[in-house]
Image (tube, rainbow, N blue to C red):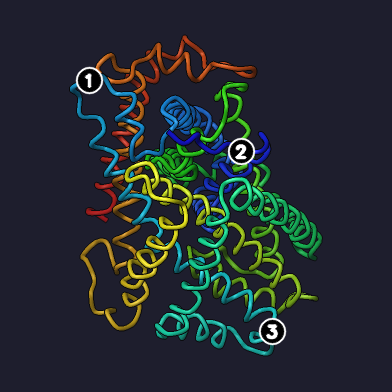
Amino acid sequence: MKERERFASRLGFILISAGCAIGLGNVWRFPYITGKYGGAAFVLVYLFFLLVLGLPIMVMEFSVGRASQQSAARSFNVLEPKGTKWHWYGYGAMAGNYLLMMFYTTVGGWMLSYFFKMATGQFTGLDAAGVGDVFYGMLASPGPMTFWMVVVVLACFAVCSRGLRGGVEKVSKVMMTCLLLVMVVLVVRSVTLPGAGDGLRFYLMPDFGKMMEAGAFEVVFAAMGQAFFTLSLGIGAIAIFGSYIGRSRSLMGEAVSVTCLDTFVAIMAGLIIFPACSAFGVSPGEGPGLVFVTLPNLFNAMPGGRFFGSLFFIFMSFAALTTIIAVFENIISFAIDLWGWSRKKAVCVNLVAIIVLSMPCILGFNVWSGLSIPQIGNIQDLEDFIVSNNLLPLGSLIYLLFCTSRYGWGWNNFLEEANAGEGIKFPRGLRVYVSYILPAIVLFILIVGYVQKFTA
């Protein structure tokens, strides 16, 4: 059997795992829900749930990957007790990775497209309506959207084709370093704008009265949801990187490093967006509206706005591309682990498959715009709903049960793998919490997510 590839360095593992977790949800969803649910007080609640919800599940995914030395397509087969059916979830994990890329590649294309538009001055001189027309015109044009999606897919598969060390690790290190440097420059620009103080106070000084105005239950549930979804847990996207590392370091310590980096990017995104919005008297909007309509207007009004706008969209592109490269590596490993394909064959087949599978999302905004699912929305909304509201929580539940149940891999096996090596150990005293309380919380998130979706 061919020996599995290994990361060249611990830093590479941490940066790539963080790159997988750090996505557009950190950058546009986190500031939006922070604004909606009371600012700094919400951030504190979110950080608490990140620690008690996200961290244990991440350690479990890493452990299953490292112990099995396989991707999610085969990891359960290797570790499950004989005669059990845990391996059935391998299909769910694979479906989750493909579904995520069916719409994420399109959004990555939007980011690259906007970097190009901003850098070439296409927003210069446009009023608010004109900036809005650029975005909605882009959605109405399947040709340019397909072009940018294909550029993203080709570029990211090209990186993966060069192997784990020579491609994925090397490029992700550069991208993540650039992403962090660009963020620092944008934060400095944003917090020094005249009138930025109100936005900073709202974001950094907890006011629990504001949180209560939004409703305590709503705030707690939103914080739980964001903490849970921000790390992309449940579809084995993180587990693959566990299979590429040795046993010299404990996995709790590594998961803490990845979670801290993910949180740092989310917090910094807020330091870019809240002071800037405050300085120019705009409210942080939701999702695409904030990034593609509000912020280009804001950059138009800012001294040196074209330069800082270009920096912002290259930063957004890096956030999207690091996730796409990480998930593509997972998808390639499915074919290698399941069928023994060469990396080159896995890249070529999946490159064509992802381009074809990404087309419904693009066409859902224009040619197929009449196709809408009640209470869910267009094709992109449907794909996102299947992943975010179903596969992520269900998959996390399966990882939890698999690692704690005597009918699965089991608590002692999990603990032995997680705590092998130097570093922070996973506390043995958390057994009752991760075996019973945490699965109940994940189930609660799944059910309440459905109730909110279909009763709103």
Residue drawn 30% across the image and 83% down it:
367
Q: Residue at x 33, y 63 (%)?
A: 381
Picture quadrant of residue 103: bottom left
- Mark 3, residue position: 120
Q: Residue at x 52, y 45 (%)?
A: 21
Instruction: Identify the disc placed on residue 82.
Output: 1
Q: Could you tell me the amino acid type at mark 3?
A: Thr
The residue type indicated by label 2 comes to Phe
Q: Secondary structure beneath disc 2?
A: loop
Q: Residue 348 or 235: which is nearer the viewer?
A: 348
Mark 2 or mark 1: whose residue is earlier in sequence: 2
Exactly how many numbered labels are in the figure? 3
Residue 277 location (% of width, % of height): 65, 65
Task: For marks 2 and 1, give the CA distance.
Answer: 31 Å
Q: Nearer the viewer, mark 3 or mark 2?
A: 2
Sequence-wise, which precedes: disc 1 or disc 3?
A: 1
The residue positioned 23% from the left and 75% from the top of the image is: 371
- Which residue carries the number 2 mark? 7
Q: Give the camera-side residue of 177 and 292.
A: 177
Going from the N terminus, do you reach mark 3 or mark 2 first? 2
Residue sitting at the far front:
1
Q: Amino acid at mark 1?
A: Lys
Q: Residue 262 location, x and y as percent?
A: 59, 43
